[in-house]
Image (cartoon, grey):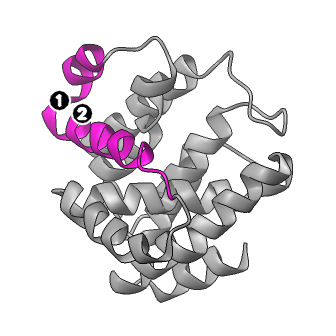
Amino acid sequence: MTTDLSGIYDLMRTKPNRWEKNLLEKAYQVAKDAHEPQKRSSGEPYFNHVFATARNLAEFGLDATTIAAGFLHDVIEDTPVTEEEIKEQFGDEIVFLVNGVTKLGKLKYRGRERHVESLRKFFIATAEDFRVVIIKLADRLHNVQTLEFVKPEKRKRIALETIEIYAPLAYRLGMGRLVGELQDA
């Protein structure tokens, strides 16, 4: 996978202005530096995952602020970079989005059919800003596309969670193509 920002710029609905490019370049670099030592189960650099999440957001037609949050969505949770550092460099809005994705990531599906709908509703209620849910969906899409590198028991849980929680959530948000991608992966 190429991790060149020009590919993200090309996917954006409108050509990014200088401010948007600066924001994306800074988020790209902070995420790249923060995740530098980390590897995914596949052995590839962890940064490839956050890049894929940001790329998905650009494909979905989201704005530069949301794409920047996509780059940073795992930085506070998984690296030594603090919330205060992200706030100082990127402001309250991006910290809010990153923290929202982290909060949603802590929700775990327990396999009880009667709780599926309440969990979907909780996702929506927890995400005071719909962009948090969209970032989580972009994150999940890349995760299911790389499931072959995950242990079988975790793979099964993620697949079931994706089919029963994330795909219906994408459907409710009118993201039909994403529904298909989540179900097929």
Q: Is residue 45 left or right of residue 140?
A: right
Examine the rendered structure and indicate whether residue 141 appears above or below residue 174. above
Q: Is residue 106 magenta?
A: yes
Q: Residue at x 34, y 63 (%)?
A: 62
Q: Is the magenta region chiefly helix, strand or loop?
A: helix
Position of residue 128 in the picture relative to residue 106 (left or right): left
Residue under pointer 1: 91
Residue 107 drawn in magenta: yes
Residue 80 on image: x %, y %: 46, 11
Within 10 Å of the Cα at label 1, are there few (<14), some (14-19), or many (20+) other Cα atoms?
few
The picture places residue 68, in percent across and down from the top left corner, at 37, 42
Q: Which residues are magenta?
A: 83-109
How far from the left and from the top, in percent, is residue 78? 51, 24
What residue is at 28 percent from the left and 14 percent from the top? 85
Above-or-below relation of 98 to 160: above
Between circles 2 and 1, the one closer to the viewer is 2
Whole-angstrom CA distance, mark 2 to mark 1, is: 7 Å
Q: CB of mark 2 within 8 Å of CB of mark 1?
A: yes
Image quarter (top left, top right, bottom left or bottom right) of the C terminus: bottom right
**Observer-nearest residue: 47 or 97?**
97
Disc 2: which residue: 95
Name the image quarter holding residue 40. top right
- Identify the residue at horizontal 67%, vertical 32% (top origin): 46
Q: Which residue type does callout 2 highlight? A: Val
Q: Element type at marker 1?
A: loop
Q: Closest to the observer: 61 or 16?
A: 61
Q: Which residue is depicted at the point 56% across and 41% down?
A: 50
The local secondary structure at tag 2 comes to helix
